[in-house]
Amino acid sequence: MTSPTVWIVGAGPGAPDLLTLRAARLLERAEVLVWTDSLVNPQIAALAPASCEQVRTSSLTLEQVLAVVLDRASAGKTVVRLHDGDPCLYGAIAEQICRLADAGIAVEVVPGLSAYQAAASALQSELTIPGLVQTIVLSRTGGRTGVPEREALEHLAALRASLCLYLSARHVEEVQAELLRHYPADTPVAIGYRVSWPDQWLSVVPLAQMAQVSRERGLIRTTLYVVSPALAAPAEARSKLYSASHNHLFRGGI
């Protein structure tokens, strides 16, 4: 007899057609869907069968969520735990996996597209430009829950990399002030609200206007900031990978 399995599935940034095929197929055969209704597009949850039991988690504690998951999985149900974005990024899956493992329940994690990827795609932008920026940092400001001191925004901003900030809109004034200590005031910042949803709002503004624009739009949640010189990359920037003068395993160089 095989042990019960719970699937932790990434819903992606919002648009149903940005789901992975694996995620869509699991949703289509779910018998129990435990989903983050405050963050996941209801159209994605609607892909589950009409007979599927749906449990919304926005008003539940982690213990209450796990109680449902454990009960249904132990009963042999196909349980899908649906997270927004990619569950490996601010998804609180570590404690869920540990608790399920303690109960003898196996877990499989299905990745999802993250909002920073959807935002860059919508802007037709590459976040790693040769000679300009080659590093992408995914993080958030400290806020109520804090971050390790070594990961404080001042240390991350000092890299002047492509910096993608989640869960930071409530503290945008402090974030902008710290970023201005490291990035030029005219550094482009992409501000994305509900990226890929029907009501998506996405705009690129100078860093010096980041807080003002956020407050004018009333942004406090489901907001992503991408701070990057790559968003204003020179047209002549070119990767060596496809240069005729660059040789590699599959192509000789000039």
Image: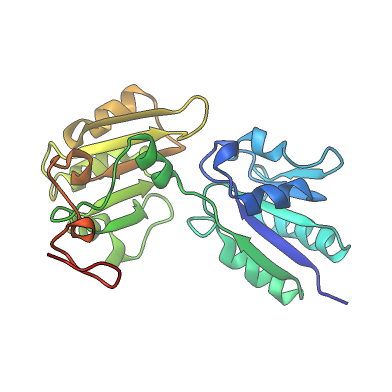
Residue drawn at x 22%, y 58% as measured from the top left = 134
Please tell me which residue is depicted at 88% across the width and 77% down the height of the picture: 1
Residue ID at (27%, 31%): 204
Residue 40 in percent (x, y) is at 60, 40
Residue at x 25%, y 33% (from the top left corner): 210
Answer above or below: position of 81 versus 54: below
Q: Which image quarter: residue 221?
A: top left
Q: Tell whether 254 sits left or right of 9.
A: left
Q: How many labels, in total?
A: 0
Would residue 14 appear left or right of 189 to someone viewing this image?
right
Could you tell whether 1 is left or right of 138 in the image? right
Q: Position of residue 203 (x, y in %)?
A: 31, 29
Answer left or right for 145 relative to 5.
Answer: left
Residue 103: image quadrant is: bottom right
Q: Where residue 217 sits in the image (x, y, percent)? A: 36, 23
**Which of the two residues, 103 or 86, is positioned nearer the viewer here?**
86
Asked whether residue 167 appears in the rendered view, the answer is: no
Q: Looking at this view, is 136 or 182 the one in front? A: 136
Residue 6 falls in image quadrant:
bottom right
Image quarter (top left, top right, bottom left or bottom right) of the C terminus: bottom left
